[in-house]
Amino acid sequence: MPRPTQEEIDAEIVDRASALFARHGYRHTSVQQIADAVGYSKAGLLHRFPGKEAIHQAAVRSALERSEDLVARLTDVPAGPDRDRVLVETLVDNALRHPGTSAFLYALSDPGSPGEPPPEVRRAGLALADVFGVDPEQPDPGRLVRMIVVAIGIHHAAESAASRGRQHEWRGHIVATALAALGSG
C-alpha cells in the first residue's frame, strides 16, 4: 500500500479538525484535541500547521473549495431530475469521504448558529441554494424545506455510515432517500 502524500496527510488533518470545529466551535477546540484526533503530538501538528488559526483557515478553504467545485460541476446541467441526481450523489460522496469537512460546512452555514456566517460561506450557501433551484429572495417553501431536509439528512446519514464503517453499503440508500425527499426519486 503506497504511503500517503503530504497533501493527503494535510487533508486528513484538516478533515478531522473540521469535525472538531463543527462539534465544539473554534474557541472550544484546542490544538491538543486536534493532535489527539489525528494521532500526532502537539509539536508534530504544529510542525505541519503554525497554529490553530492556520488549521481553521485551511478548514474554511477546504469546505469552500468542495462547495465551489460542486456548484461548478452543475452550472451546465439543466434544472430537474438529472441535476438533482448529480447534486445528491456529489453531496453524498463528499460527505462520505470528508465527514469532518461536511459537518464543518453545515455548522458554518447553520442559521441556528450564533453570529453571522463568514461572507464567503454565505456566498457558497447562496450558490448551493441556486443549484438546488431555490431562489433566496423568493423561495418556494416546499422546495426550500426539501433542500434543508436533504442537506441535513445527507450530512447525518453519511456521518452515521462513516461511524459504522458502512459508507459503501449505505451510499445507494442515502442517495435514493435524498432524491425521494427532493421529489426526484
Image (spheres, helix red, strand yellow):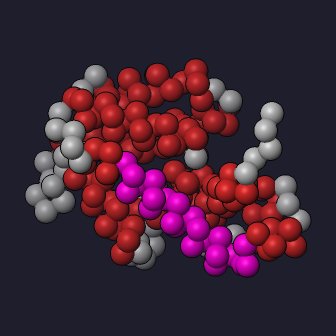
Residue at position x 80%, y 74% in the image: 46
The residue furthest left is 138
- Whole-percent x and y of residue 99? 58, 46
Which of 65/98 is in front?
Answer: 65
Which of 44/92 is in front?
Answer: 44
User: Is 79 placed above or below 123 here?
Assistant: above
Q: Left or right: 180 with respect to 27? A: left
Which of 182/78 is in front?
Answer: 78
Magenta region, residue range = 49-70
Q: Left or right: 99 with respect to 142? A: right
Please check the rendered image and state whether residue 112 is part of the magenta-colored stretch, yes or no. Answer: no
- Whole-percent x and y of residue 90? 41, 38
Residue at position x 53%, y 60% in the image: 62
Q: How many marks?
A: 0
- Whole-percent x and y of residue 102? 51, 51
Which picture quadrant has residue 109?
bottom left
User: Is 30 placed above or below 81 here?
Assistant: below
Q: Is residue 165 visible?
A: yes
| Magenta: main secondary structure | helix
Which picture quadrant has residue 119?
bottom left
Looking at the rendered image, the quarter that the C terminus falls into is top left
Q: Is residue 149 visible?
A: no
User: Is 74 placed above or below 26 here?
Assistant: above
